[in-house]
Amino acid sequence: MTIPKITVVAGSAGAGKTTWITQQIACSDVTTSHVLYFSPGVGNVPIDQTRLKSEYPTVKVFKDGEEVEFLRHLPSADAVYIELGFYLELNAVAPILDNLSYRAIAILPPHLQDSEYHAWADKIILGATTNSSMTTTQLWRVPTTGEVIDEDSLEDFWYEITHAAYGQVSRAKGIFDVGDGRSLYADFAAGVPSTDFLELDLPRHLENRPQRFSGIEVSGENLDETAIGQTLEDCCLSDAAIWQYQQQVKQVLLEEIEA
């Protein structure tokens, strides 16, 4: 039986959908293959798209509003991955893939049984053991493109996010530009061991405010969205502080070159 080149991946929050897709991409020869990735419904906060593009620059990544362009590239693609966020209905992909052949993959925590995903998927893959007692009634997203965050303040803020200072968080992820010019990826799922910030494979930005994407997504229950937004704003650096950080980093990098 021939496996369709289009793979639609769905599953619960934090179970590992994007991780599984990146593993599949890593196993292919992305230097010669034409690989497409599309995750509908993320609006102007394309966190997973930005991370994936930084790791695999040759993969063609599509955002909301680019559906026509995505469909135009389908015939020439070697592999296509469509990721459905937990906040989307499973039939959300139907208008995009109407009359097209695809395999449905569900990434689920081991404890989840007899869900709608089990009835939908062609194959079930066991993912991370997320906290099944956590519910998601709110989804808060904010783009922060152009903002630069103080790294120490970011660490404190992320600790508060992940330790219920602003409500019961089931899932949180974000990409942040920090003072030394790096772009950091943060990821949290309730019940899954915490991980350190991941530096994205992007050039250091050391001239004025960055115009590449940054942003945050938080989902959970009883979230104090106003407090989250205000704390995040308090972490952002002024123009003068950004300039000072950038001059310090450029001086250090210059000294390393000359050494």
Image: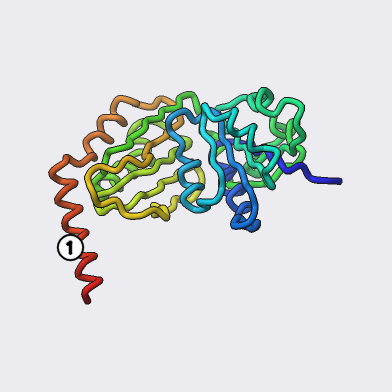
Residue drawn at (23%, 46%) of the image: 150
Residue drawn at (35%, 49%) of the image: 183
Q: Observer-nearest residue: 183 or 59?
A: 59
Q: Observer-nearest residue: 20 or 30?
A: 30
Classify 10 Å Cα crowding around label 1: few (below 14), some (14-19), many (20 and above).
few
Q: Quadrant of residue 249?
A: bottom left
Label 1, on which residue? 251
Residue drawn at (46%, 30%) of the image: 220
Where is 68 relative to 147, above or below?
A: above
Q: Going by the picture, which residue comes out furthest to the bottom?
A: 259
Residue 174, percent from left and from top:
40, 41
Residue 151, percent from left and from top:
27, 49
Q: Which amino acid does label 1 sit on?
A: Gln
Q: Observer-nearest residue: 44 or 130?
A: 44
117 lies left or right of 165? right
Where is 20 relative to 65, above or below?
A: below
Where is 165 relative to 188, above or below?
A: above
Residue 78, percent from left and from top:
69, 47
Quarter of the image where the C terminus is located: bottom left
